[in-house]
Image (tube, rainbow, N blue to C red):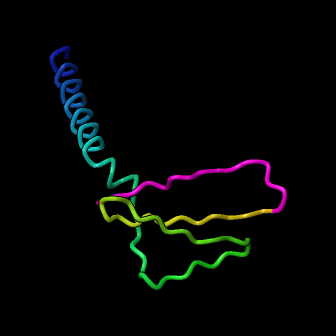
Amino acid sequence: MRLQALKIAGWLLLVYIILTTGTLMLQQKLIFRPEKLNAAYSFSFEQPFKELNFKRDDGALLNALYFTVPDPKGVILYFHGNQGV
């Protein structure tokens, strides 16, 4: 009976290790699921905004949306994450 309990505990530990390792290795693909947009894509929102593009030294193009409001109380900078850059 005790040997069987140890066997079960060993298998459960092995399954836990496999699941944890797999999750760790795949976390980028599980968390960040980017969607490539057509170069001619046009954003549409009810709030006023400006679309900004920044070119990095390595040639990468960073796209940003700047939402404006009258009498702002602060700024929120949000990084959505990326994949495969």
Residues shaded magenta: 70-84
Q: Quadrant of the C terminus?
A: bottom left
Residue closer to the observer: 3 or 67 = 67
x%, y% of residue 78? 56, 52
Residue at the image point whose x is 15% and y is 17% from the top: 3
Q: Is residue 70 above or below residue 28?
A: below
Residue at the image point whose x is 73% and y is 75% from the top: 46
Circle count: 0
Q: Is residue 30 left or right of residue 25?
A: right
x%, y% of residue 10? 19, 25
Residue reaching furthest to the front = 57
Residue at the image point whose x is 49% and y is 68% from the top: 53
* Most common SS among magenta residues: loop
x%, y% of residue 23? 30, 43
Residue reaching furthest to the top = 2
Q: Is residue 70 left or right of residue 65?
A: right
Q: Quadrant of the N terminus?
A: top left
Q: Is residue 53 above or below residue 42?
A: above
